[in-house]
Amino acid sequence: MTNINNESRRQIILEEIEAVGHISTTNDAFAKKLFSHKDILIDFLNAILQREGENLITELNYTDTELHAENSYGKISRLDICCTLVSGEQIDIEIQVANEGSWIGRSLFYWSKLYEGTLVKGESYDELKPVICINVLKFNIFTDSSMQEPHTTAKICNMENREPITSLLELHFLELQKFKMKKISEMSRAEKWLAYFSGKLTRKDEATMQSDQILGKAIDIRNSFMKDPVENQFLIRQIIN
């Protein structure tokens, strides 16, 4: 049954590429390839996290994506993209196409494992560093009519004044289905990235974005992804396994 499922997924991927000329930007193998370009990842993070001035991200280090279990009964998980900033902040980016449920709990689980790892034996709790989880979702998890914006940010807040009490926990949910297109010239940097991942860009939109050094590069990477027949088979095996 596994072989049949894998062959079906392989066929779906190839049909998608043939139909639109490129792979979906929310394919996890593609996202890992895209964000392996450090300049693209930094630009994306600055846009989504609204970092500027003294808080602008200028450098980062990629880190291990495997969350190891503490014992034989613990759950082992593998993150999509994980990095550490110069400040010591850790960032996890997850790309998800299918709604498998409990996504908020899943994001909190990933956060907790990374947060635990920011402190080593002998260090004070004052040494704990913030962990930020960014979830790029091709489905909606917030269905309330008051939550129609595509970007939702969650922090630990005082229930009385709604002000955050700490920066140690920060979750971002990018619900791509909720993103509404408008003129590229009217978009913020974050909205341009949402447009890119949403798959809602027209060829005219993409032509306009090509003048942008980073976004133009991101479009070129998507267009050339899996064009090499040899790399094609290798990447498909990565995607379906």
Image (spheres, helix red, strand yellow):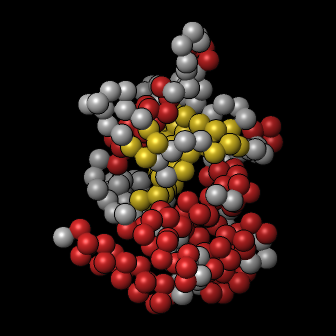
Q: Is residue 18 left or right of residue 37?
A: left
* Residue displayed at 59% across by 63% down: 33
- In the figure, residue 140 lies in which quadrant? bottom left
Figure disc tally = 0
Residue 121, how many percent across, how many down? Answer: 54, 13
Residue 63, how many percent across, how many down? Answer: 59, 41
Question: Is residue 232 shown to the viewer in this render?
Answer: yes
Question: Is residue 153 shown to the viewer in this render?
Answer: no
* Residue with the most extreme left position: 1
* Residue displayed at 56% across by 75% down: 231
Nearer to the camera, 59 or 68: 68
Nearer to the camera, 180 or 116: 116
Nearer to the camera, 122 or 53: 122
Residue 129 sits above or below residue 86 on the image: above
- In the figure, residue 229 lies in which quadrant? bottom right
* Residue with the most extreme front position: 230
Can you say which quadrant of the picture contains the N terminus? bottom left
Can you say which quadrant of the picture contains the C terminus? bottom left
* Residue displayed at 47% across by 58% down: 95
* Residue displayed at 37% across by 32% down: 69
* Residue with the most extreme bottom position: 19
Nearer to the camera, 95 or 180: 95
Residue 101, how many percent across, how many down? Answer: 28, 52
Residue 146, how many percent across, how many down? Answer: 39, 53
